[in-house]
Amino acid sequence: MSKKPTKATITFDNDANSIELPMLSGTAGNDVIDIRNLGKHSVFTYDPGFMSTAACQSNITFIDGEKGQLLYRGYPIEQLAEHCDFLEVSYLLMHGELPNATQKTEFTSVINSHTMLHDQLSNIFRGFRRDAHPMAVMIGVVGSMSAFYFDAMDVYNPQHRIISAHRLLAKIPTIAAWSYKYNLGQPFMHPKNKLNYAENFIHMMFATPCEEYTPNPILARAFEKILILHADHEQNASTSTVRLVGSSGANPFASIAAGIASLWGPAHGGANEATLDMLEEIGDVSRIDEFIKRAKDKSDSFRLMGFGHRVYRSMDPRAAIMQKTCYEVLDELGLHDDPMFKLALKLEQIALEDDYFVSKKLYPNVDFYSGIVMRAMGIPNSMFTAIFALARTAGWIAQWSEMNADPEHKIGRPRQLYTGETRREFVPIGKRK
């Protein structure tokens, strides 16, 4: 086996000079060229979207897109989704190891002690229109938490980081559920700490003060899997946003609110909402062939949402888990004959069998199945991305904490390739043409 290179050399045309740069290797994934000192040579790299740039080192999550592999702290997502609950996975992301029985009990107790919101935060909700998108409400309320929980916001104090992490993980389900209740005009339902994390959220979403409500255990477990599968996903747009905002020393609530704002984009967290919107546009099984034809036509702007993935070149490992969960939920609710779900399942069949989709590896992804599951549970499309934010909070907190604990971390300062005007002299307004 050939030895890995330890340095890279950049040579410039018509120039005898060259630059040697060290190469770094992680425990898995691609090697990287360390370009931190490149600026001393009056040259930068150009990488729109940072598609070939490692902006940090992290030991939290690893994706192998070619193999269709997702690891949290080294554990395959399939094993975690099968055997763990969401708080157990959150503990793993935050602390690096799965908790033992005592640690899990203590962690659950701490999170439960923080689930309630400051009473005056309810006034923040009431400042929004009733038809405001839940993501808009979440961004505002999470950002405003810094005005209510400012006793532990020293980002350089490890204990303060832990307290803030616990508060965020505990309170964002309440904020997300209340965003929905506010849309409906229903009373806010306070958390019930005798319920587990997923059950508690479902209760706050669907219960009313009028009568007792008991979450369906099969639906609660399905929802728990959605949370686990979306808890972290390497340095995506929203995670990178949390790190970039946090790199300035911004408080944790501002950093997470920025991550929620980034996630709201339709190219990122809005994919499962877009999938259901697409199904509604197709409308009926009889129109599938028409839309499949349009999807194959490069000149047509229509795209099938919920198929393929930017990172995974084979099957999204989360999709296989969610596919099984999807069928369990449809069985439990007796929805296999519902027109919308029949349409979704027919699209799934085509994507798994049609040569065009198979050759391009456009398999149904996690957003396709999670969207179907949430719709079956009675969760409206507008809440899909809010639930994604709820799940991803665990990863954002872990990434934010890791960055602030890293002695090498610096404030983010991307460079640019300037293409504007060079120096010009000012002309008084009366002399301008």
Image (cartoon, rainbow, N blue to C red):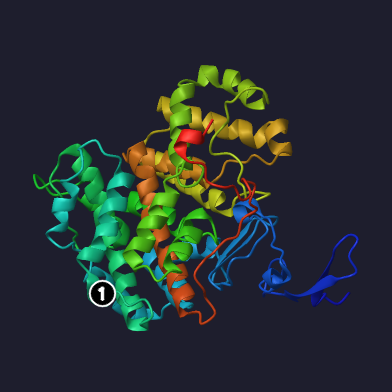
- Can the viewer see residue 327? no
Total number of numbered labels? 1
Instruction: Please give left or right for residue 15 compared with residue 208 in the image.
Output: right
Q: In this view, does 86 lie above or below 332?
A: below
Task: For residue 70, say whether it is visible.
Answer: yes
Find residue 188 and report its horizontal and vertical position in percent. 15, 49
Looking at the image, the residue that sits furthest to the left is: 210
Q: Residue at x 41, y 78 (%)?
A: 99
Q: Where is residue 3 in the image (x, y as percent from the top left)?
A: 86, 77
Q: In which quarter of the image is residue 30?
A: bottom right
Q: Quadrant for the C terminus, please.
A: top right
Say if 96 sits above or below 203 in the image: below
Q: Is residue 202 left or right of residue 365?
A: left
For disc 1, the marked residue is: 109
Q: Residue 9 location in percent, x, y?
A: 83, 70
Tell me: 273 left or right of 147.
right
Residue 378 location, quadrant: top left
Relative horizontal placement of residue 151, taking residue 237 as reference (left or right)? left
Image quadrant where one finds the N terminus: bottom right
Inspect the image, locate mark 1, and give the three-letter code of the amino acid beneath it. Ser
* Nearer the observer, 90 or 254: 254
Q: Quadrant of residue 101?
A: bottom left
Taking the view exactly as shown, the residue that stands out farthest to the front is 431
The local crowd at label 1, few if under 14, some if 14 to 19, many if 20 or more residues have their Cα within 10 Å, is few
Comparing 48 with 331, the one in front is: 48
Q: For this rendering, which residue is in front, 260 or 110?
A: 260
Task: State the residue at coordinates (38%, 44%).
Answer: 384
- In depth, the one of 286 and 414 nearer the eye is 414
Q: What element carries label 1?
A: helix
